[in-house]
Image (cartoon, helix red, strand yellow):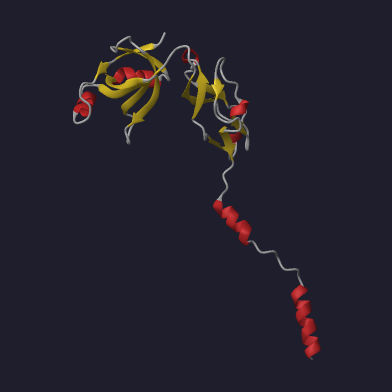
Amino acid sequence: MAVAITTNIREKVGGRNPRRDRRDGRIPAIVYGRGEEPVPVCVPLKEIEKAVHSNTRVVELRGLPGNPQVAIREVQWAPVGEDIVHVDFVRIALDEVIIVSVSVDLVGTPKGISGEGILDQPTKELEVSCLPADIPEIITINIVELGEGEEIRVKDVAPPEGVIFTAGPDTIICRVIIPVIKGEEETAETFDMPERIGEDKTEEGAGETKEG
């Protein structure tokens, strides 16, 4: 069963209304998709925060005609801090496949960082294609056995049942990298090979003998 969020239609859009909504504990949002006209709404801040932070992807909008089920398509955040300022909802059909982004959760401490290795995670979300009922809350990956110089790609992760990853199979999700110290590189580049003892002196001596 989808999480229910109380929804009110915004009669006036723009101006001071969004700021007034936020002051009253509501967040402006938009509902669109499936050939219907976009509907500006507002939702309680606490309810949408709970849904977003629990990685809920499908919600029911209570207060709109038919209490439609929608997917959270996009969440806009304040430039500073972790405040939600706007949400996009897209209408869905429970029997139609949709594509949404799901957060990637790395579990454990890689054995490769016990030395000089550093964990790098280029991919923090993965797009998945599935029915709304099959949308995973999160993609969990165990990284305990990840060693120095090793990586985990999309093809190394088994998707949940009924789910297809849309990213390329060679997309890197995470890896343990070895940092290169700049000073060491410069030392290696400017290091001079030692002279062979007596080589230059022999040539100089030969020249002096001829001149004499």
| Residue under the image location 28 percent in, 15 percent down | 7
Residue 77 quadrant:
top left
Residue 111 visible in this rendered orientation of the protein = no
Q: Position of residue 196 (x, y in %)?
A: 75, 68
Residue 171 quadrant:
top right
Q: Position of residue 99 (x, y in %)?
A: 48, 23
Quadrant, the N terminus: top left
Quadrant, the C terminus: bottom right
Residue 114 quadrant:
top right
Q: Of 109 and 72, which appears nearest the observer?
A: 72
Left-right relation of 138 to 19: right
**Count of number-bearing discs:** 0
Q: Of 123 and 142, which appears nearest the observer?
A: 123
Residue 182 visible in this rendered orientation of the protein = yes
Left-right relation of 212 to 148: right
Q: Is residue 94 above or below residue 200?
A: above
Q: Of 35 and 31, which appears nearest the observer?
A: 35
Left-right relation of 204 to 112: right
Q: Which residue ends up furthest to the front in the rendered image?
A: 35
Q: Position of residue 190 (x, y in %)?
A: 61, 61
Q: Position of residue 50 (x, y in %)?
A: 36, 18
